[in-house]
Amino acid sequence: MQQKSNLYLVGPMGAGKTTIGRHLAKAMGYEFFDSDAVIVDNAGADIPWIFDIEGESGFRQREEQVIDQLTLKKGVVLATGGGAILSEDNRKNLRSRGVVVYLQTSIRFQLYRTQKDSNRPLLQQGGRKKVLTDLLALRGPLYEQTADLIVSTDKSSPKNIVQAIITFMETQP
């Protein structure tokens, strides 16, 4: 693998992408970005509002633009939204512009970590376990195909996960 400096975190909601991303960026001296937060800042509106007004397709277009812009930067850790992986352009940009880490988690841990979150439009449709199961069935293979490294976040502390990612980075040519 060629030398890649940026780190891109992919995985389902509740996997810990933002938490791990912040710790990882600090440990590596990189700048941290959360693509969902950048979308919200750019739009001047929260994600549920964007979904209500523009639908998921409008949100995904915004997401593609933000990921394209952020992956052109150097020395960044980027936490992507759970559905960012659905876009072929996003997958291509992530793979070609940095190291992709799939933060893998179980449905059980996702349910626990997202139980009080009302800012995730896809979970507001009821049947959270079924929604998460269906999303993972669709997105899981894409996360795996895109990732350079897969790390489970179920039973590890953020500190241990960050160390595993840094160790992986240090072994890359």
Image: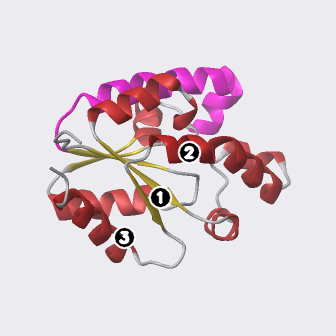
Ranked by sequence position, the earlier of labels 1 and 3 is: 1
Q: Specify the quadrant of the image occupied by residue 111.
A: bottom right
Specify the segment rendered in magenta: 47-75
For the N terminus, the image quarter is top left
Assess whether mark 3 and mark 1 are in contact (beta carbons under 8 angstroms). Answer: yes
Coloring applied to the structure: secondary structure
Residue 97, placed above or below residue 154: above
Q: Can you tell which mark lies on residue 161?
A: 3
Q: Specify the quadrant of the image occupied by residue 107.
A: bottom right
Q: Residues within 10 Å of mark 1 (few under 14, many from 20)?
A: many
Residue 110 on image: x %, y %: 64, 64
Q: Can you tell which mark lies on residue 68?
A: none
Ranked by sequence position, the earlier of labels 3 and 2 is: 2
Q: Residue at x 21, y 61 (%)?
A: 26
In magenta stretch: residue 54: yes
Q: Residue at x 47, y 35 (%)?
A: 40
Element at label 1? strand
Q: Residue at x 43, y 42 (%)?
A: 37
Q: Amino acid at mark 1?
A: Leu
Q: Amino acid at mark 2?
A: Gly
Residue 105 on image: x %, y %: 57, 64
Residue 111, placed above or below residue 54: below
Q: Residue at x 65, y 38 (%)?
A: 48
Element at label 2? loop
Label 3 vs label 2, nearer the camera: 3
Q: Specify the quadrant of the image occupied by residue 49.
A: top right
Direction from residue 141 to residue 172 in the image, left or right: left
- Alpha-carbon span between mark 1 and mark 3: 9 Å
Identify the residue under disc 1.
103
Identify the residue under disc 2.
82
Direction from residue 110 to residue 23 in the image, left or right: left
Element at label 3? helix
